[in-house]
Amino acid sequence: MKKYFDRISRWILFSAGFFVVACSSTTGGNRDLEMPDGVSAVGEIPCPEGYTRVAAEKSDFAAYLRLLPFKEENVVLLYNGEKKGNQNANYAVIKMDVGKKDLQQCADAVMRLRAEYLYEQKRYSEIAFCFTSGDTARFSKYIEGYRSKVSGNNVSWVKTGTEGNTYEQFRNYLDMVFMYAGTASLEKELKVVESLGEILPGDVFIKGGSPGHAVIVADVAVNAEGKKVFMLAQSYMPAQEIHVLVNPTDETLSPWYVAENNGRLITPEWDFSYKALKRF
């Protein structure tokens, strides 16, 4: 594996031919950037009429996602502080740092949210993600001071770092993961969700490859007939703040999407097959 050489195009090249390419970006005009009145977190976005949020325990990933707070200004910023060119995709922007490097893109944002949830619960041994090479980066080893050493397409772990599980070390670990993982590796890690009717908060629509993209299911609601709707959140390229997506095909339902196997899932900046739904 070679050191990544172009963060703008998000290539991570391996000497054996492996690579990661993040999602390509689009640009567009600005829509009304007013935040929804009275809504300050994912779980406060009103459900469509007749729907209620699926049940979740306080310790569930769903509960964590619902507590994610929003920025007051509905403007997506890039890692360098500049505004994203396309402000038409975001319904609301999650209040979470994106870092100072062009690292936290689409699959990275999914891994970030999952890792933040596990870190908050001190479930350190469960924080682990695969590099595109197939090697697993475990936070539990990072805590012990082990750091990745890359030679060609081989990854070894050498005890050269400081031991500890501070939040700063956790973020440094994630930056390492973001550098060497992506949609191709994450898609292989996740388990297939057989039916869209089984969709849950924390599930992921993902297309691995070059190019590829990933969005996370931020919340799910159900009606008395058992029909479900869901919300999506993403980061994109260049690295940018995570944001809840609008529904570009149904403004009256937005930001919710109907969970039905009909055609393709059309999001503001990517289309997915409904069979692309996976789970941690």
Image (cartoon, grey):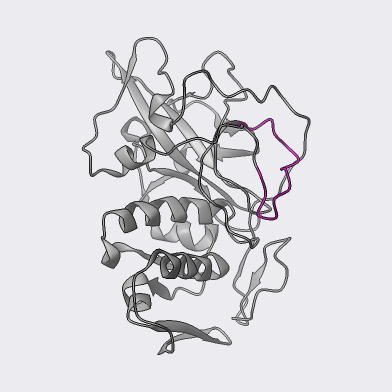
The x, y position of residue 21, in whole percent, is: 64, 60
Q: Which residues are magenta?
A: 77-90
Is residue 249 shown left or right of residue 192?
right
The x, y position of residue 62, in whole percent, is: 32, 39
Residue that appears at 41% across and 73% down = 137
Reply above or below: 230 against 38.
below
The x, y position of residue 129, in whole percent, is: 41, 65
Secondary structure mainly formed by the magenta segment: loop
Q: Is residue 208 magenta?
A: no
Residue that appears at 59% across and 58% down = 209
- Quarter of the image for residue 190 reads bottom left
Is residue 101 shown left or right of residue 228?
right
193 or 20, nearer to the observer = 20
Reply above or below: 219 against 135.
above
Residue that appears at 47% across and 19% down = 38
Q: Which quadrant is home to the N terminus?
A: bottom right
Reply above or below: 41 against 159.
above
- Quarter of the image for residue 165 reads bottom left
The x, y position of residue 275, in whole percent, is: 45, 40
Q: Is residue 81 magenta?
A: yes
Is residue 124 shown left or right of residue 39?
left
Q: How many marks?
A: 0
Residue that appears at 47% across and 51% down = 110
